[in-house]
Amino acid sequence: MPFVPNQFTQRAVKSKLVTPQQRITRRRFLGAAAATAGGVLASGTRRLGANAVVAPPRSGSTAHFWYRLQPAGPYIDSQRDNKAFGFANATIFLSEDNARTWPHSIAFPDADDITFSSILKNGNIIFATGSRLYVSTDNLKTYRSITVKDTDGADYIPHKPRDPGRPGWYFHPLDGVHTWDVNGVEMLVWGNYCNVLGGAAPVNIYYSTDNGRTVKIAYAFGQNPNYRDNGSEGGGSTGTLLGDPGNPVVCRHMHCVAYNPAENAFYACTGDRDIADKHECHWLRGSYDADKDKWRWRVLVSDSSNSRYKSGGINFVDGKLYWIADANGPQPHDRGIFRCDPADIARPEAHTMLFNPQYESANMIIQDGVILASHYAPASPYATGFIISQDMGRTWAQYDLKEFGRRSPVRFHEKNSDGWFRIDLRSGWIKRGEVLFIKPKQISKVRR
């Protein structure tokens, strides 16, 4: 019998394998199950939205994966190997057994405002609220605030927000993989998905090479006149300009940053709109000189929002570049899941479309030969849509897990030591909903 934890009941979802670029009929979730799990209960709401306690665990199965909601208890914000970081009741928590128990905790009054966290290889935990960044180096016995360093080494001080309750999402990412081994040193690199909720913020790429003890800016985008701090959730055309006044490259927010070990280079993509003669969708390539602690970035391509460059989910496998596009605008839409040599990113004629899910999608992870991606709920007939290939893009399937309602899966974390991916389910597009775990089945179990 396929492995499903004992406390969950399993019911199957019918599935069908399809070949690349074949449209798939929308699938209906046929079953769900329930049980309860213990844990630290939370109350109230979070600034990101939705309830502070997830519903009792529900699980199910498709031909390609098992899935389950997180158990009741702290909101599981990130995971790594056997560890998980969570928060509830003005407290932050650390688990060492994949969220079964939470032996480490400390009071943190702004826990409900956490927008980012990452567990580093040496055990340090870095986490953030709107415009403030913190690190714990002792399993949450203590934590301290981090002052980010600008590209010139000076302290990078967040702007004074017009509305103190909306300081801006300085550190909130849309992707879930932020650490890589770079020449024997773990690097933490990520960009902020902002100017949607929480107030206006400048757009930056951040990095750390010393296990999160210090964080610096790798790249600062220019001042976008359409996302000034006017006190609103996402900014507007009046108010305080934010960003680097000397950089003409502007965007709304970061979609993804990823590392290619074959080139020893980082790639980043941004969004979101076309404003007059300015594009906000860019792809950048960055190289880091560790000896000089300096970055060199160049824009590889800038294009309209109705192009494959409005995208996310950047992954590198065996030197090849993979990504997924959420192009929108007048038809025809230039979207899908693509692969190419990194040197050919600016040459669409050199791209291979592996699959077209038909609807906007911008989150994807690849691990152990499995490609897992998701639909953007407001633009798709899928309620909670997932796209999966277990053979690196030769065959594909899509599933609609309707029992979770209208949800957009984002922030895909690599599998924990039990083999489960961790995924945010966001209400609409960006308000926090639930946490879902997905465990791919062995390919031999998939019907052909």
Image: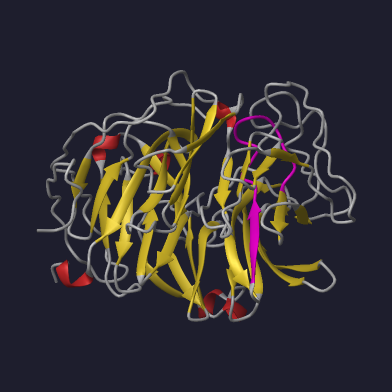
Highlighted magenta segment, given as a residue range: 185-203
Q: Position of residue 215 (x, y in %)?
A: 74, 52
Colour scheme in use: secondary structure
The answer to whether residue 189 is magenta is yes
In the rendered image, which quarter is residue 43 located in? top left
Q: Judge left or right: residue 174 versus residue 404.
A: right
**Residue at 32% across / 57% down in the picture?**
418
Instruction: Count all numbered tags in the image, as a single digit.
Output: 0
Q: Position of residue 106 (x, y in %)?
A: 56, 31
Q: Is residue 90 visible?
A: yes
Going by the picture, which residue comes out furthest to the top? 44
Overall secondary structure of the magenta stretch?
loop
Residue nearer the viewer, 412 or 155:
155
Q: Quadrant of the C terminus?
A: bottom left
Q: Judge left or right: residue 215 versus residue 27.
A: right
Image: 369 above or below 365: below
Q: Judge left or right: residue 107 versus residue 45.
A: right
Residue nearer the viewer, 76 or 362:
76
Q: Position of residue 441 (x, y in %)?
A: 23, 63
**Residue at 63% across / 51% down in the picture?**
254
Residue nearer the viewer, 445 or 185:
185
Q: Position of residue 319 (x, y in %)?
A: 52, 81
In the rendered image, which quarter is residue 95 located in? top left
Residue nearer the viewer, 133 or 367:
133
The answer to whether residue 235 is magenta is no
Q: Is residue 303 visible?
A: no
Image: 315 above or below 220: below
Q: Quadrant of the N terminus?
A: bottom left
